[in-house]
Amino acid sequence: MLRRVLLAASASQRVRRLTTTAPLARDVVRRFVAGETAADALAVARRLAADGMAVTVDYLGEDTTEPDHAVAVAAEYVALIGLLAEAGLTEDGRAEVSVKPTAVGLGLPEHGEKTAAENIARICAAARAAGTTVTVDSEDHTRIEPTLRLVAQARRDYPEVGCVIQSYLRRSPGDCQALAVAGSRVRLCKGAYRAPDGVALAARSEVDRAYARCLRILMDGPGYPMLATHDPRLIAIARSLAAAAGRDPGSFEYQMLYGIRTDEQRRLTAEGARVRVYVPYGSDWYGYFMRRLAERPANLTFFLRALASGW
Ligand SMILES: Cc1cc2nc3c(=O)[nH]c(=O)nc-3n(C[C@H](O)[C@H](O)[C@H](O)COP(=O)(O)OP(=O)(O)OC[C@H]3O[C@@H](n4cnc5c(N)ncnc54)[C@H](O)[C@@H]3O)c2cc1C
């Protein structure tokens, strides 16, 4: 119930205004967000790289409504990739970027898909030149079809482009099957958006079981699975499926979010596993932050306390 309220709040302009103008909110947000600028993201990426971890950097923002803004988002990514490359972090894809289709134009009232495709191609070209790649995030369930089309289109020129499957969607085992092919990079997550019952599994236990099912499909296939979860049980299942499939540690990776279960990120790295941390930055943190609250209501108590002490 609380999760539903928080996910509804993530789409509310009124709650957004209230939250983002509270001065102390920013301090709490910093637990999950690297900072406001690309330089802040770079500093975090350097730190994580020094600890043996890879990163995928996300310029925060979604649901772009102006074509010019969608182009500006793509330009920000190109500049970001330049900074990461200058710092020597992009070799071997150690630092890559994650892009939300609606941030680069998918939701525009006219020519959204075409605009997003052009912007994604720009970002892919910069990533390729820097020796790294791009993962296209998955958003709300209504965007899945066009997002998969965008990924398929980008892969014609840039086969290394990654995509994301959300295990809470009923369609996902079928999508995994289709994507478990040589050369494909697939991030598997549980899914962070609101979705109706007909489209998504409602119970957490069902979502977890579906995750394990998708995991098996990806691990048994010839592609490169990227296991985005902080769930210890699923991480243990991933480890045994990888062993059963005869995969070596370099043939798949774990992914976790910046600021969440950092102890586990370090532990897996020390074990010799590949770990990539999703590092978001930018001032448009509201939607991302509210989804993190929805995942763990304990975060809400912490956040409300910080807000109350500031008013
Ligand atoms: C690298 C990465 C990329 C992602 N990309 C996408 C995407 O493109 N599209 C999409 O829909 N979703 C994405 N997600 C989010 C994902 O769908 C889940 O909402 C999120 O990861 C929480 O699910 P979980 O698998 O960690 O399991 P959960 O069962 O939610 O959590 C397991 C444990 O992890 C810890 N934990 C989890 N979330 C939090 C939190 N917010 N705060 C504190 N502790 C927490 C807790 O200890 C919890 O018990 C991504 C997640 C990761 C890690």
Image (tube, helix red, strand yellow):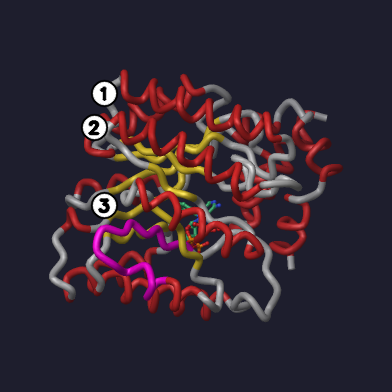
Residue 111 is situated, as x and y percent measured from the top left of the image, at: 67, 47
Q: Which mark is residue 88?
A: 1
Q: Residue at x 83, y 37 (%)?
A: 18
- Magenta run includes residue 179: yes
Q: Check disc 3 and report its element: helix, strand or loop.
A: helix
Q: Which mark is residue 24?
A: none
Q: Image quadrant for the N terminus?
A: bottom right
Residue type at mark 2: give it: Glu
* Residue 82, placed above or below residue 173: above
Q: In whole angstroms, how far apart are the C-alphas of marks 2 and 1? A: 7 Å
Tell me which label, 3 or 1, sits earlier in the chain: 1
Q: Residue at x 24, y 47 (%)?
A: 269
Q: Which residues are magenta?
A: 176-189
Callout 2 touching callout 1 (CB < 8 Å):
yes
Q: In whole angstroms, how far apart are the C-alphas of marks 3 and 1? A: 24 Å
Q: Residue at x 54, y 27 (%)?
A: 35
User: Which of the two residues, 191 or 4, is positioned nearer the viewer here?
Assistant: 191
Residue 53 is situated, as x and y percent measured from the top left of the image, at: 29, 40
From the viewer's perspective, is 172 left or right of 275? right
Residue 21 is situated, as x and y percent measured from the top left of the image, at: 79, 29
